[in-house]
Amino acid sequence: MDNLETSIQFQNVSYQRNETIILNNVSGDIYKGKITALVGPSGAGKTTLLKLCNGLISPTNGDILVEHKHITDFEPTSLRRQVGIVLQNAPIIRGSVFENLALPLKLQKKNLSKDEATAMLTTVGLEDSFLNRDASDLSGGQKQKLAIARTLINRPKILLMDEITSALDPISTNEIEQLIVNIKEKYGVTIVWITHNIEQAKELGDFIWVMMKGQLIESGDHSIFSSTRNIKVQQFFEGKI
Amino acid sequence: MTYTSLALTLIFVLIPLILSRTLQLGLEKDTIFATVRSIIQLLAVGYVLKFVFDSDSYIYIFLMIALMIVAATLNARKKGKTIRGITWKIATTLIIVEVVTQSILLGLNIVPATAQYIIPISGMLIGNSMVLSILFLNRFTAEIESNKDSIELILSLGGTPKQAVHTQLINAIKASMIPTIESQKTIGLVQLPGMMSGQIIGGADPVVAVQFQILIIFALLTTAALSSILVGFLSYPTLFNERIQFLEANNQKI
Ligand SMILES: Nc1ncnc2c1ncn2[C@@H]1O[C@H](COP(=O)(O)OP(=O)(O)OP(=O)(O)O)[C@@H](O)[C@H]1O
Ligand SMILES: [Mg+2]
């Protein structure tokens, strides 16, 4: 195995809400510049894990390190720019495609140049001519590409994505998968990708994390698909859960 | 007006009671309760006012206004239960509104500094401020509730609390102020404002009554703007913690 640098480290991370334990003692490393596919049944705690990394919520127990620094030592806004997230059903704000792209910079009272905007559109496979279109007129796939582009405007070191293709047709899904691989290669960003599609995880994930009921029960490279001894995980891989 | 003729006005209570009974609206109990309450409250206020006017002491005027602010705060805070410390935020707002408006009215000698002017005008302005706070809180909490995704989006991209709720805050401030502005457009055309009608019935020159009404509606504009904006800017920070996390998202008691 080549030299792997860690990007995110989870150390006994738990997250509890009221009396419910949503994440239970999750420990593991996410590697830099790689795609980690995060899979697991609905309600396993995948979205919660991503929100913890972006700082939208804080663990009730345990530590998370981003590039070897405790997330509590980051300014919340700075952490969120470095650890970008594309939320499940991320809303497109009212206005043009350009206004959506410019949003992250506007939040810092900065402007987005037209060149940067068109360059970013090209990166995510949208044409320049989209720039002044009303964002609400875009198709589902185009909206997802725009949401990814909008998060990328902050130039994050880590990109978290929550089921960004689950509502798309196979062609758009394929385009976005290709796009993510390109982004990884172009920017060297670390990617954590939640998907409920095992084939997608197999195809794109350098590493696979399987979560169930708030626990990380299996993780590793592709070998886990054949080597896992956990019956539940085997059944999940076979699509039986 | 004699007490005999006042007693005769109970006919106006009897009519809805009879209608409620015959049509089985089931409103009799509420109507009687409301009637009794209004008689007791208004008579009490009448006697208290008479006492305050006669004594002409600033202490009583001050107490009277303090009482109004307390009553208005307790009423308005029910709408903002989800916002931490809402009682003090509303109380602060009402106090600022009262201080600002009275400083202008009394400081510039627009009205004489006597109980006869200070108390009714304060009552109208504080009452309006209370209604505005309620309108604002209703709208703001509804806007927040239905825009959680957008709030979370802005936070996730590195936005501040103010940026995250900016749209909802502005929408709620605007929406709560619109009725005040709109009602001024038709004022006098459809119905005569209560205070003006009262003065005219009381025998005042209609032109003088109109002058006072104009004073009030202008003051109400300031009250409306100040109330919504103050309650708004005092409230929104409590929706977030020091890690800039939206407290709704943590499902904590806010
Ligand atoms: N706001 C909330 N209040 C209470 N419980 C919550 C809340 N958000 C999530 N949960 C619970 O936490 C658990 C994990 O949720 P999470 O959204 O992280 O799951 P997930 O793995 O992303 O599921 P899915 O694949 O359906 O998106 C679920 O049981 C969910 O009901
Ligand atoms: Mg999820």
Image: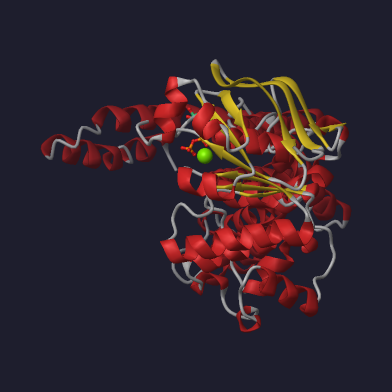
Between A115 and B118, the one nearer to me in the picture: A115
Q: Compared with residue B16, is residue B139 higher up or lower down, i.e. above or below?
A: below
Q: Compared with residue B59, is residue B25 higher up or lower down, i.e. above or below?
A: below
Viewer can see residue A108: yes
Residue situated furthest bottom in the rendering: A129
Q: Compared with residue B113, is residue A125 higher up or lower down, i.e. above or below?
A: below
Q: How many marks?
A: 0
Q: Which residue is pictured at 69% across the width and 54% down the height?
A: B166
Between B237 and B247, the one nearer to me in the picture: B247
For the C terminus of chain A, the image quarter is top left
Location of residue A112 by image quarter: bottom right
Q: Classify residue B247 as left or right of residue A1.
A: left
Q: Classify residue B183 as left or right of residue B233.
A: left
Q: How is the image coloured?
A: secondary structure
The image shows residue B11 at horizontal and vertical percentages of 27, 40
Q: Classify residue B55 as left or right of residue A222.
A: right
Viewer can see residue B46: no
For the N terminus of chain A, the image quarter is top right
The image shows residue B119 at horizontal and vertical percentages of 69, 41
Location of residue A178 by image quarter: bottom right
The image shows residue A106 at horizontal and vertical percentages of 78, 63
The image shows residue A175 at horizontal and vertical percentages of 54, 65
Q: Which residue is pictured at 67% across the width and 63% down the height?
A: A149
Residue situated furthest left in the rendering: B22
Between B243 and A146, the one nearer to me in the picture: A146
